[in-house]
Amino acid sequence: MPQQYFRPIPKTGRLPAAVVFDLDKTLINGDTTLGWTEYLYEKGIVSDPRFREANRRLVKDYRAGCLDLAAWLRDAVPAYEGLGAEERGRLVESFIREKIEPAVYRDAMKRVEAARAAGMSLFIISASAAFLVQPIGRLVFGIDYAVGTDLVEVDGHLTPEIAGTASFQEGKIVRLREELDRAGLTMDEALFFTDSRNDLPLALAVGDVECVNPDHTLREAAMKNRWRVSSWILTR
């Protein structure tokens, strides 16, 4: 089965020891952050239209590769900073069941299952907030190594302040290297799946890359670097 889905990494000549997935539009057909905000509107927890406007700016800047993540968090986190840890946890679990699980790409789950069967270590790394990424990794994919952007928490309430290094653009290199080090693995042993130009720094730092429904900039980089390009669909 590994040979069906994975090729030897050029830097090592061996099959990957670590398989690393971006989350949004790579494992799932959608964006976790945008979906979470819309879920809060749907549940009547949020009504102020400014958070939708913040998300429209997020999409525009992210696609252009110029997103200021810290500035966006200052605009977006007030939508849910009033939620205590227990209420937030319940909402996240229902959000995952109702919105994330139906959005998982069939091919993504096949890759996860094949890597697990082959004894490869599995990781998720996403710019989305850790309070969403970690339970998605655990509940949907059975992946404990799920890294998101950590937010400072005060008395059980999240704040817009980033704790440590954000797992975004170059920050993904820092965060993934930390996780691989803990697992006794190296960047050269890692295969990375992503869809976005924003992940080019990490893509260039790991052993191999597979581009999933890539944007134009990432597709051009795939051609230059001889990375695989795949088209994944939602139908199960």
Image: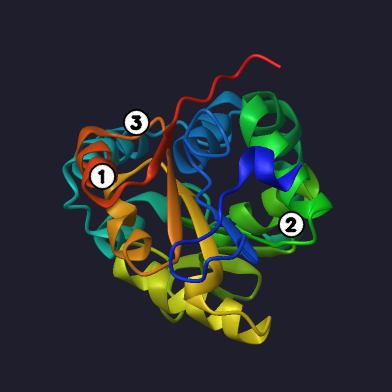
Residue where numbered disc 2 is placed: 143
Q: Amino acid at mark 1?
A: Tyr
Which residue appears farthest toward the front when viewing the image?
A: 13
Question: Is residue 25 depicted above or below 127 in this figure?
Answer: above
Residue where numbered disc 3 is placed: 49
Which quarter of the rendering shows the C terminus? top right
Q: CA distance from mark 1 to mark 3?
A: 20 Å
Q: Are marks 1 and 3 in contact (CB under 8 Å)?
A: no
Residue 60 location in percent, x, y? 21, 36
User: 202 or 87, which is in the foreground?
Assistant: 202
- Would residue 195 appear left or right of 30 to someone viewing this image? left
Report the residue at 29% width, 56% height from top.
200
Question: Is residue 38 depicted above or below 188 in this figure?
Answer: above
Query: Which mark's residue is nearer the viewer, 3 or 2?
Result: 2
Mark number displayed over residue 62: 1
Q: Amino acid at mark 2?
A: Ile
**Colour scheme employed for the rendering of this structure:** rainbow
Who comes first in sequence, dot 1 or dot 2? Answer: 1
Are there few (<14), some (14-19), or many (20+) residues within 10 Å of tag 2? some
Q: Secondary structure at mark 2?
A: loop
Q: Secondary structure at mark 1?
A: helix
Which residue appears farthest toward the right when viewing the image?
A: 117
Instruction: Tell how many labels.
Output: 3
Report the residue at 57% width, 39% height from top.
27
Q: CA distance from mark 3 to mark 2?
A: 35 Å
Query: Which mark's residue is nearer the viewer, 1 or 3?
Result: 1
User: 132 or 155, which is in the foreground?
Assistant: 132
Query: Which mark's residue is nearer the viewer, 1 or 2?
Result: 2
Say which quarter of the image contains residue 40. top right
Mark number displayed over residue 24: none
Q: Is residue 104 visible?
A: no
